[in-house]
Amino acid sequence: MLHDVGEFGLIDRVTSGRRQPASTLLGPGDDAAVVAAPDGRVVATTDVLVEGVHFRLDWSGPEDVGRKAAAANLADIAAMGAVPTSLLVALTCPPDTPVALLTALADGLWAEASVAGAGLVGGDVASSPTLTLAVSALGSLEGRLPVTRAGARPGDVVALAGRVGWAAAGLAVLQRGFRSPGSLVAAHRVPEPPYRAGPAAAVAGATAMIDVSDGLLADLGHVAVASGVAIDVRTRALDMPLRMGEAASALGVDPLSWLLTGGEDHALAATFPAHIELPAGWTAIGDARAGDPRVTVDGAPYEGSPGWDHFAPR
Amino acid sequence: MLHDVGEFGLIDRVTSGRRQPASTLLGPGDDAAVVAAPDGRVVATTDVLVEGVHFRLDWSGPEDVGRKAAAANLADIAAMGAVPTSLLVALTCPPDTPVALLTALADGLWAEASVAGAGLVGGDVASSPTLTLAVSALGSLEGRLPVTRAGARPGDVVALAGRVGWAAAGLAVLQRGFRSPGSLVAAHRVPEPPYRAGPAAAVAGATAMIDVSDGLLADLGHVAVASGVAIDVRTRALDMPLRMGEAASALGVDPLSWLLTGGEDHALAATFPAHIELPAGWTAIGDARAGDPRVTVDGAPYEGSPGWDHFAPR
């Protein structure tokens, strides 16, 4: 148990022998880390996962949870058009938490950070009744302007990189007591954000970009409001995997609701001027138009709930 | 209640109309913030406070808690010899948390950030049974090398900036059911780290530095181990305020234990070459010597517990 090794024992176990990227100028173990910010700016974000709210340890292994916590933050960095460099992790957990669980969490954080080219440079651990992982991520814009939510213009193409609906479908399957299809359940456990598609979109000239964490319609809604444009999504442009259709039939659910409102896959959505050839990994799924800031689906308002607001009345 | 305004309503209330420092290139509201890192490096740290562990809302007001959470992180930045630029905040709380409590927390975070010259540039909020504030801080080294824990050399002077023992004395007073002396209780509620003393020490040539958060002996112990030196502390060099002595008498406690082992005042301790004149705000309290890495008090081992290890067996 954590109680037996102590705070410093745990920190030692999760940091020693790990390989840091070149951007880590001073790694864990001091009051603070020092990270390279080559163009004189740093991109920074934070996201928190709570046991019982964002994950259940009977549905996801601790390494999965670590990967998911890292991915949620790394995807936010990519959504600015930046390349992730570092993670910081604040962990709270009960004193009787098994050390093996915590080192597995750390393994997951390190594994996902490595996928994105980042390192785990610092952290804190504190006693709490609730297991919580608050992760912050840093990144580099490599000399480019950040791609915000506010730059979409009428006439722009709306495009998507990565998967939508998979994590929501996997969660629905688990909530009904099933463990398959495996590909959907795996997508709930560990998202696969298209990290490289973020900087690629920035290089190609994307006008706006967002991490799809609350659901495609909800997140495109943020772009519509920030940019002052109307957005229309073409459902036939969205990829509906065979397994998702089958799972939806089995559960009696409209699979389109997963595609349009499912969060946590951490796809990236962006807008591009119409004349630009989309970079690899990006697919056109709609367009931005002059008009009141809202998102329509195949030209009409969407009838369901657009996505996730953590504390909204239900 | 938070439940009524929702996640986005809360974020709006705690970010709109605030004044950002010049280092905030892109503030809250997008996937990530962008912060200036003028010398091509960024200092980064994270710390988490948990209700019932680090604070009690019947002993501290929510604004106090926000200030304390910010101070713990800002002091870590100062302890590297850096100037704080930004905070990111991940908040977890029950859905029925009053909005006024959360905006007061945010007021405290902003107030303390302003004291140190930083801005609140990003955050996340999630539902949890436990109120938790995970704060990350960023800072700028202004072209200097970071002052780590590892640079102390035999012959160096050990010096202190800021207060020690006050927060521990204030907590002891509260734990016994008293509310005075007010100065000690206030120190428990809101620490007053000497932010400017960190960069000043770096400019003056400090060889090692640390934020005193676990207790003077425990934190000097980290310097001793990282630097491979022995450190001796002279107790007569430590300032014992009249109120602290009186409170110790009333509670039947040795006040020296507060000075030597009390954490959470976020003083800074540093080592300087003996020939250097200490910068303003710094007082010599001991010296570094060749020898096994350990900390002695007036030349002898200290008999009590040296300080705080969050999960250590007690």
Image: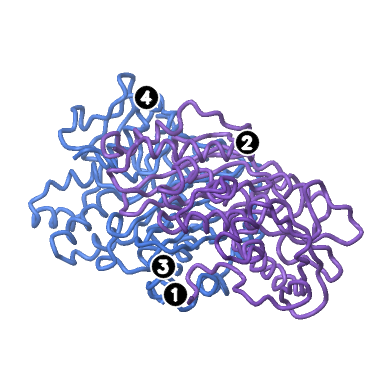
Chain colours: A purple, B blue
Q: Mark 2 points at which residue?
A: A23
**Nearer the viewer's eye, disc 1 or disc 3?**
1
Is residue B206 in view?
no
User: Separation of disc 2 and disc 1 at Cα?
Assistant: 41 Å
Type of residue at label 3? Answer: Leu
Q: Do labels 2 and 1 share a chain?
A: no
Lower position in the chain sequence, tag 1 or tag 3: 1
Residue B64 placement: quadrant = bottom left
Lower position in the chain sequence, tag 4 or tag 3: 3
The answer to whether A107 is drawn above or below residue A186 in the figure is above
Q: Mark 4 points at which residue?
A: B155
Q: Do labels 4 and 1 share a chain?
A: yes
The answer to whether A304 is drawn above or below residue A259 in the figure is below
**Nearer the viewer's eye, disc 2 or disc 1?**
1
Type of residue at label 1? Answer: His
Most extreme residue toward the bottom is A292
User: Separation of disc 3 and disc 2 at Cα?
Assistant: 34 Å
Q: Mark 3 points at which residue?
A: B105
Type of residue at label 4? Answer: Gly
